[in-house]
Structure formats: C-alpha cells, structure tokens
Amino acid sequence: MDMTEKYYTEAVIDALRLEMMEDDDVVVMGLDVKPSIWGTTRGLYEEFGPNRIIGTPVCEGSFVMAGVGAALTGLKPVVELLFSEYIYLAMNPIANVAGVWPHVSNGGFKVPMVIQSFIGANGFGAHSHSQSTQASLLNAQGIKVVIPSSPADAKGLLSSAIRDEGPVVIFHHRQLLPMTGEVPEGEHSVPIGKGSVMRKGDDVTIVSFGAMLYRCLEAADILEKDGINIEIIDLRTIIPFDQELIAQSLEKTNRLVIVEDGRKRGGIGSEIAAVFTEDYFDLLDAPIMRVAALNAPIPYSEPLEKACLPGVDKIITTVKKTLE
Amino acid sequence: MDENTFELTREEALDLYSKMVLTRHTENRHEELYQKQVIPVSTHLGTGQEAIACVISGLLEKKDYLIGTHRGVAEYIGKGMRVEDIFLEYGGKADSISGGRSGLHLHSPELNILPLLGELGTDFSLAVGAALSIRNKGLDSVAVDYFGEGASEQTDFHPAMNMAALYKLPVIFCCCTNQFVEYHPYRESTCTADIAPRVEGYAMPWQIIKDGNDMFAVGRAMKEAIAHSRGGNGPYFLEFKTYRLAPHHSADQCIYRDEKEYEKATKKDPVPIAQKALLEKKWLTTEELDKITAESLKIIDQAVKTMEESSLPSADTIMNFAMAT
C-alpha cells in the first residue's frame, strides 16, 4: 500500500473526503466547519459546498439532535463538537436518542452517525477546553467510542466510524493534531472494537489510548533500563474495549495498569479494572492500578494543569508498585 | 391564490372524520383496558384534540415525516398506523413494531413516523434533521413536528426554529395549545398567551387557528402550510387553540382545572361538531355516520383480539439491537 507522510489533521480530512466522495449521504455538520477551527474539515466546503459541509449556529445540543434526525432519515452525518466538554450539551440526543432508538425500534431505525470531538489538555484551556470526557459515555447505552493515536489510525477509525450503522463518537486528542505519520493512500479502515499491541513486553501490561500512549512509551523506555519490560496496548476503541487482547497480554504479564488523562473516578480505567477483576481474576498477580487525572477540574495556570494530569513519573511509580 | 384551494374536499373530510371517530374510540378502549389491567401503560388521552391531530397528519403523504406526541393516538392514526399496531405496542407484545420495547412511544419506520421522544420538547431539531435529509436527497416531502405548548418551553425550541429558517427547510411546526402542561394551566409556565408570534423573530410565516376544534379551519391552515413548505419556501408554524378535555394521564384528578371552563369546553367537542358540519353540508347521512362508528368499533374489537392473543416477547430478545455492548 502506498504510504504518504501526513499531518494528523490531513489524515482526518482524507477520511472525510474519501467517504464523502464514495457516498452522497455523508455530510459534515458543526460550528465553523467551513473555516475549520481544528483544521479537521479544512478545504471540504470548497469541494462539497454548503449542503454537505453544513455550518451550524451555536447550539450543540440541537445540532447534534438534527444530526440524529438526519441519520434516522437516510443521511450519514459527521457532527463536530469543538471540545469534548460539549458532549454534555449534547447528552440528550446522544444518550437518550441515538444510542437507544435502534434498540427501542427493534432495529427498525438506524442511526448511522459520527460525532467527532476533541479531548486533552494542551496548555491554558482550563476547565472547559481541556478535559477528556470520554468516560461520560460509558454509562450511555449504544454508543461506540474510538480514540486514535496516530494519523493512520485517525483516518482508519474515522472511515470505519462513518461506515458503521450505529452512532460512533471519535475523540481526537489535541496534542496529536500537529503530529505527522505515514498514512495509507486510498481506502483505509481500522476495525472498531480491536486494540493493538504497540510495544511488546513480559512484565507488566499497560492499557492506554490517544496521546497518553506516548507518555507510556517514554515510561517503558526508562523502565527497560531497570530491566522491567512493559507491554503497551493501544485500545483504539474505548467502548466496547478489546477484552480478548488485554487478556492475551495478561497471560504473560499478570499485571495490569491503565493509563488515561480523563478523571480517575468513573474513568475508562475503572470499567476495565472492574471487568478484569470480575472475569479474569485468575490472570492477575497484583491489584490492577489506574493512572489518571485528579478528581478535579483541569485548571488554567501551567503548574496547576500539570499537577492535575498524570505524567511519566506517575506511570513509572505505579508500574513499580504492581511489581512489589 | 384562490382561497378555496385550501378547503377540505368531501373525500378528505370524510376520511379525516373517520379517523377522528376511530381515534376517539381507540383511546376510550385503551382507558378501559388500562383500568382492567389488560394494558399496562396508562393513557394520556387526546380527547378534544382529534380535529387538530387527525387533520394535520391525515393530510400528509407517506413520504412525509411525522413526529408526534404522547397525548393520544390521533396523529398516528392520521398518518395511517393500524389500531392493531397501537394496541400491540401498548400491550408490550412480541409482534409490536418495537418487539415490546417501546410502550407508549409510538413510531413506525415504515410509515415515516419518527421516534416519539420521552424527553418533552427535545424533538424540534429532530424534525430539522429529517428536513435536512429531504433537502439533500432532493425530495418534495415535508417534516411535521406536532407538539403541545408545554414543549415550546423547552430549550431546543429556539435553535430548531433558527436552523429551520436559516436553511429554509420544509418543516411544519404544529403547536397544539390545549391550555394545560401536565398538571398545570400553561399560563403558569408560559409568559404569553400565544406561542406562534415568537417565530416572527425567525422570519417564519405563522398562523393562529383560533378554533382548533373545527376540522375545516385546521384543514385550510394545514393545506396552506404544506403547499408552502412542499413548494420549497421553507418552514411554517401553525398554532391551534383547543382545550384538553382529558386529564394528563389516567390517574390525574385534574384538581388544577376550572370546572366551569371545563364544562364549557365539553360543549365544543370536535367530534360532534364535525358530525354536524358534515350533515349540514350533506356530505354524510346519519346512516353513514352510524356506519363509520360501527366500522371503527369493529376494527378496534379485532385489534384488541389480536393483541390479547399475541404473546409477550421472549426474554432472550433483550440484547437484539443493543449496540456497543
């Protein structure tokens, strides 16, 4: 397959453009999708026009509901929410309608829609423009959540999300938007529900996703010098997560650490830990540990933001704890 | 345009009247079956509102989308839903459209009746979305959102009106002002007597139909709105005034209701009013009226029988279509 070095945002545009060319029902909706705030829809308005790149008023809850209405009636909307905090503004259409009505209607209605939003602190975003709110969707029924960790995965997961017949939320991590990487040309999809092993190791399994994976890789390199070999799993799909892949890794390591930059209480790590304690206890030689953001809003000022989020040091000390 | 263009024809009027009668008897039967504990879900009767709901939905074509309310079955019958499907749904039966998952929340993918949302007043933008599909696919359908004045208090009202007008979409908003919001008169929670003039702010055409119990007045307004929106001229807002003759739901004692006002309103029941008008126009004879009632009762008896003979869903269907599990 031909590969081209691309920015993460270019890979997102790649997926949108290909899917829009493939299927006239694919439309993009959201605030300022024409100029494109994050660069994820840049140039598409000029190519596809106002009926397919639909700039919306400032009304997240309502334009996501309009997206649901469009999806119920034959379009395949990709609705952009500029900050993952806005998921809360759109919780009614997401959790009460999009995720449940395919079930309520016994499969009669389909909601083939994607919500594309942005997570992660990137300096001075404070409480409303920094958080990673993916775990808020854990308890909402019927919503798949994917979080890419590279330009290639951004393209592949977004394409798969658009082709999925149910609602899928894709969160892009702001720290990854300026990243470059090799991206397959032409059609490229990454299966939803499957994780991948990012680094092989025998001593401890770290499960993570998005930008935090790169903190985990740094920690693993440091730990390797102490003779500790870390296996890192990139979840790629957060809901539902790839239990099988984690279990395979635990067969070797028997130790599990989950790393995320969402809040610790009720986080993705909490759910994984609960599932593995209930169903895979035999695979564990140590308590499952979580590395996550503090149970506080993310603050504005630099030292406060830094203190709120987990860093490499925290990952290293936590891994060592599971080996005690 | 000739004003008479929007008058109901004899054929339309008879069809809509039959649907009003069928609605009234279906709802009354639901109440009976609820009291007898045959149907588990209580009623939210639409008694007194049949002229509005049956006419606005009955004038639609299959290709048009409808979002209805939880109050009664008029708009569902109007759009062509079978009484059998309504009772199967209320009965929670395996053969219902939802396979026993939905209950009160009627819908029909086949008839383009979109989900009746349980979160009151959050479906305005759902209609906007359906109209986006209509626009993008180049269809001449319309999307009708039928709701009560209580729903207009919800936060989705403004953005939906704004988007519908901004994108010039074929949405017809039909507000049924029945004087009550759940357990209180609507003026206790809405600051103005009329809802429709608000959309002046969205440069959207609107009408208030002062007598929503007159099926001919409802028909004229709705036909005008359909012609407007189907013709590519954007959204339209209709407000129909009526009086909720029913309690909020089966167990409501209506202690908040002015009994004199209620007594007065019972004299303006839209079903006998329509009957009288059709007789005066000589579009129907009394024998034909009786026949319509008898046929309605026959349909309902058969539907109840089908419902009672149907089985409940098997528990192992619970995870069907549950996604992201």
Image (cartoon, grey):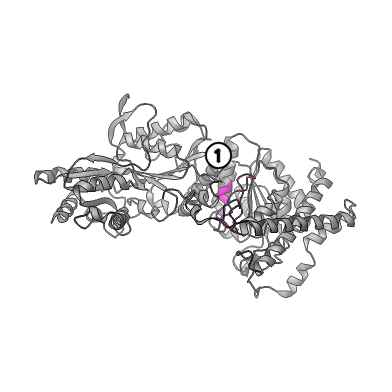
Q: Is residue B252 left or right of residue B261?
A: left
Q: Is residue B6 left or right of residue A224?
A: right
Q: In terms of secondary structure, what is the magenta stretch mainly? A: loop
* Residue most extreme to the top: A2
B69 versus A212 height, above or below: below
Task: Check the residue under mark 1 and report the chain it is in.
Answer: A
Q: Residue at x 78, y 53 (%)?
A: B18
Front residue of A178 and B30: B30
* Residue tagged 1: A74
Please check the rendered image and state whether residue A33 is part of the magenta-colored stretch, yes or no: no
> How far across and how far down the image is residue B156, in percent?
54, 54
Q: Residue at x 50, y 46 (%)?
A: A57
Question: Is residue A208 something that shows in the picture?
Answer: no
**Secondary structure of residue under mark 1:** loop
- The quadrant of the image that shows the C terminus of chain A is bottom left
B43 versus B51 height, above or below: below
Q: Which stretch did the figure color magenta?
A: B100-127
Question: Is residue A241 something that shows in the picture?
Answer: yes
Q: Residue at x 32, y 34 (%)?
A: A152
Q: Residue at x 84, y 55 (%)?
A: B291
